[in-house]
Image: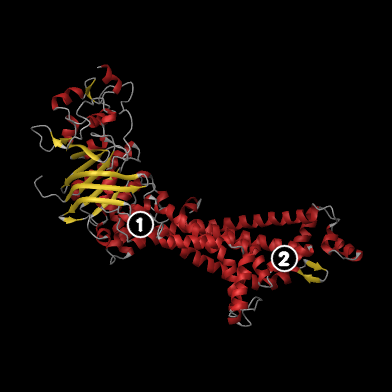
Amino acid sequence: MSSPPLLSVRDLRVGFATEEGVVQAVDGISFDLRPGEVLAIVGESGSGKSVTAQSIIGLTRANNARIEGSVRLDGEDLLSASDTDMRRLRGERVAMVFQDPMTSFNPVYRIGDQVVEAIRAHRSEVSKAEGKRRVVELFEAVGIPNAEGRVDDYPHEFSGGMRQRAMIAMALALEPEVLIADEPTTALDVTIQAQILDLLEQLNRERNLATILITHDLGVVAEVADRVLVMYAGKVVEEGTLDEIFYDPQHPYTWGLLGSLTRIDRPRPHRLPQIAGSPPSLLDLPEGCPFRPRCPHEFSKCPQYPGLEARLPDAPDHRDRCWLTPEEKKAKRLVEGQIGLESPREARQA
Amino acid sequence: MTRFIVRRFLAMVAVLFAVSVIVFVVFMVLPKQNPAQSLAGKNATPILVKNIEKEWGFDDPLPQQYLTMMKKVFTGELIQYEPRIPVDDQVKEGIPATFSLSIGAALIWLFFGLLLGYLSAIRAGGWLDRILTGVSIAGISIPVFLLGPVLIYLFANQLEILPNGRYVPFGEDPWEWFRHLILPWVTLAVLSIGFYSRVLRSNMLDVMNEDYVRTARAKGLSERQVMTRHVLRNSLIPVVTLFGLDFGATIAGTAILTEAIFDLEGVGNYAAEAVLKFELPPIMGVALYGAFFVVFLNALVDIAYAYLDPRVRLGESASE
């Protein structure tokens, strides 16, 4: 992991002016991504993970958006790039796969034609017939059976899983360096989810793709990610390698996410654990740690805003935003012998 | 697709049959008055009424009466009795004026309606959008019977650059045909321009939020390609439905007011006069004529719809 990062995001801040005030959807995110690496960004709805991803390729540019910080691809700054440069880069160098394959294709055009359109947007010299041959190859590469016969189908003639494969084929059409997958499996059946994840992992390995995987599902993360970024209310609350996050999580929010996973290797709890309450409004954040109102372990230091720091002596890249000492964390994160977040009632009794 | 078209046209024939039955029931069966008396007109002689009774077979059973009526409609024997003028001649005579007016106005409203709607949508919230919104609302709000006379007053009476009415057949003098129709076209089109631009604008703003538009941007299409190929293309689908209905309605009746204001001897004018004098044969004839165009254009719309939106082509994959 000593190669220079391909994609480097520093202190990215994205705010949207609304009638009620500025919504700071992303508040100071930094990360590096190297070729062949899978970075997972995890968090609840509204935590800013999708906005982060879309801001990288300039899809959040709008009159009411304020985007600050820096995003560098191979050293080239993307936030200050012109709209035309960003257009050339989208699909060509950074491609994106979206959550819902049902609605992400235009229903009135043939799927093959929509992929050809993506190719010809960047390579106008490619003829339509040539483009179509290329699409058949791509469809075969992503495992669409009878690719030759399916390219002329309309989106509604594809199943959800096949559509997501076609979506991935479209993203790969121009051999991008970075692939951003925004909840690529959320709208799919569990069996199909596994297939799509396998496909993403295989492509990541074969093509040395740098991948950003956005999800709310730690089960998905466990399958493919190298590094994990846990986001809450527009900020990173914990980051580390996959093992660090799963076996030595430092932030109570991460404990909550891990605790709410259903696992087949453990006895089933009578109730699925959940994190009490809901994420705060970005217009009305609590003072200090944004997770404070939902955290059963809140104490006197929490009204101060914690920095994202490495708090373990032997893991300099494992950072989190929680004031508890590592020893306290080790004790408090165990609920009935497993990692989890106590419900507020249990915490009060204790 | 062929199957779809055939099915659609069979359905159209069924609807026309139903319409003709309704016309028959409404005009011949329901009224208490002797239908022969109504057909003959207000000042008919008893002999004429007797003759019509025999000619139409009002003593026959109802299905037979219906067949007699339909035979008359199809063979051009539907006749206005006082004075004796075949109805289909009158309708045919009015068709060039009505079609010139309706088709011309439709092209104008479609072109400008879509243009203004598109510009409004891609500049939504900006000053251009606000100006166009004002213009559209004004266009929707001005009634034809006000706009027509105002245009005549301005362009015909004051500026004297355009004629104030009357229809000149295209075959006689194309340039005069065109000049005489400018004001009627504008009068008839203004309301729809406003309406269509509003409809297209709101459709486009809806479509812009669709996931596939984000996909189109993410794959690197230019903003213009995104707008025309994805946003505009999908926003036009509902507009096509609207246009089919509106255009059918215009040919079948909405054009009446404009025809009257500009003294165009069209079908609408003919129908209006027949209604005022309560001449039953022309009313029946025009009702069937109107029904035919509305139903026919609806069938065309459905076919266009299936072409524009592949999801509509029901049963196609099952049959091929």
Q: Which mark is residue B42?
A: none
Residue A250 lies left or right of residue A102; in this view the side is left
Mark 1 element type: helix
Query: In this view of the protein, which residue sits in the foreground, B224 or A323?
Result: A323
Give the residue at x 71% y 57%: B20
Query: In this view of the protein, which residue sits in the foreground, B293 or A47?
Result: A47
Q: Is residue B245 above or below residue A277?
A: below
Give the percent coordinates (x, y) of residue B146: 63, 66
Label 2: how many Cα within 10 Å (few below 14, some 14–19, many 20+):
many
- Do the residues at pointers 2 and 1 share their chain? no
Q: Which mark is residue B271?
A: 2
The amino acid beneath tag 2 is: Ala
Give the percent coordinates (x, y) of residue A295: 26, 28
Q: Is residue A71 above or below residue A345?
A: below
Q: Quadrant of residue B173?
A: bottom right
Which colour scheme appears in the figure? secondary structure
The residue that mark 1 highlights is: A114
Residue B12 lies left or right of residue A154; in this view the side is right
Report in which chain the residue with disc 1 lies. A
**Gap between marks 2 and 1 measured at Cα:** 51 Å
Query: In this view of the protein, which residue sits in the foreground, A8 or B120?
Result: B120
Report in which chain the residue with disc 2 lies. B
Q: Is residue B81 visible?
A: yes
Give the percent coordinates (x, y) of residue A79: 23, 54
Mark 2 element type: helix
